[in-house]
Image (cartoon, grey):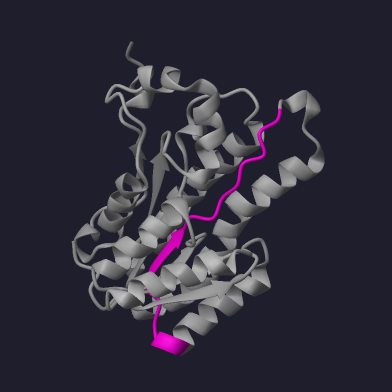
């Protein structure tokens, strides 16, 4: 899969799945900028580790919920490297609470971080990608968009929104050489899912046909496919990377 010399931007890129995506793109020859929220030490560690391998990465602190911040990040990337060809909207949070107890802040924080940020960065990048007649947009969804989990009304709504948004964007941009796809992870071993995994233990694995949790590189490999030059005829697709969790078998 060819991403050599492409310019990429990843939101939520300092740890977990986001870090794996940054590393995969950089190690395959892309110049990668990534956005982080507050953990500057983690972000700089990613930059340093990749620099030691001879790869170029740039950490940018920004609030992905802010449209002006998204506009500025995209402008800065284009100013630095002259273009923006790959956008990965990975930033996301969970605030799991049963609906009866969910307050408006728990709802709005998840919607703004997981869904509104996708709008912010896609709109900021769209004109640049259309003008250069090349672009790869990859949005991070979740199997939670299709599989009901108590306490995740906010999270499921945000990820369902991401999928519908992705399909519409794919239709709008296809004639300009820009594709838009989404990756929907299942249970992946990250800091964000550790509480769920610890609570359910081996019961989760019993529901997954491949009988293991996913790894961040399982997701980054899927993103790398959508980001590559060779994926130009694939757009508007939602790829579930879940070990068969959503197949419905016993």
Task: Give residue 228's position: percent from left, percent from top.
Answer: 25, 63
Q: How many numbered callouts?
A: 0
195 horizontally vs 210: left or right: right
State the residue in front, 4 or 194. Answer: 194
Rendered residue at 25%/55% (across/down): 225
Nearer to me, 7 or 59: 59
Q: Position of residue 50 (x, y in %)?
A: 34, 72
Query: Residue 58 magenta-drawn?
Result: no
Q: Does residue 32 lie above or below 209 as drawn?
A: below
Is residue 21 depicted above or below 157 in this figure?
A: below
Range covered by the magenta-colored residues: 80-97
Q: At 51% from the left edge and 50% from the top edge, which residue is drawn?
A: 165
Image quadrant where one finds the C terminus: top left
Q: Is residue 139 above or below residue 34?
A: above
Any magenta on residue 96? yes
Q: Quadrant of the N terminus?
A: bottom left
Q: Is residue 230 above or below residue 215?
A: below
User: Can residue 139 be seen in this snapshot?
Assistant: no
Residue 92 screen position, x and y as percent: 56, 50
> Closest to the observer: 30 or 176?
30
Identify the main secondary structure in magenta: loop
Q: Is residue 43 visible?
A: yes
Q: Position of residue 54 (x, y in %)?
A: 27, 78
38 on left or right of 177: right
**Horizontal relation, residue 246 to residue 60: left or right:** left
Residue at x 78% of width, y 24% of height: 100
């Amino acid at each position: 899969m060819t991403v050599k010399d492409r310019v990429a931007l990843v939101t939520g890129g300092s740890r977990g799945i986001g870090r794996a995506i940054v590393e995969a793109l950089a190690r395959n020859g892309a110049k990668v900028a990534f956005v982080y929220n507050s953990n500057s030490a983690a972000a700089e560690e990613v930059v340093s580790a990749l620099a030691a391998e001879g790869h170029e990465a740039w950490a940018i602190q920004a609030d992905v919920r802010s449209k002006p911040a998204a506009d500025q990040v995209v402008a800065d990337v284009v100013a630095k490297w002259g273009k923006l060809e790959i956008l990965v909207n990975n930033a996301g949070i969970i605030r799991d609470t049963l609906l009866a107890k969910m307050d408006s802040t728990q709802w709005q924080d998840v919607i703004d971080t997981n869904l509104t940020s996708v709008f912010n960065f896609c709109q900021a990048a769209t004109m640049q990608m259309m003008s250069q007649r090349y672009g790869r947009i990859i949005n991070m969804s979740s199997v939670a968009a299709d599989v009901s989990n108590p306490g995740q009304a906010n999270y499921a709504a945000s990820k369902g929104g991401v999928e519908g948004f992705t399909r519409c964007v794919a239709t709008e941009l296809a004639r300009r050489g820009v594709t838009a796809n989404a990756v929907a992870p299942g249970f992946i071993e990250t800091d964000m899912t550790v509480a769920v995994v610890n609570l359910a233990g081996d019961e989760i694995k019993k529901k997954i046909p491949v009988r293991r949790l996913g790894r961040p590189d399982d997701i980054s490999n899927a993103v790398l496919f959508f980001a590559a030059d060779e994926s130009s005829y694939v757009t508007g697709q939602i790829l579930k990377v879940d070990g068969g969790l959503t197949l419905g078998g016993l």
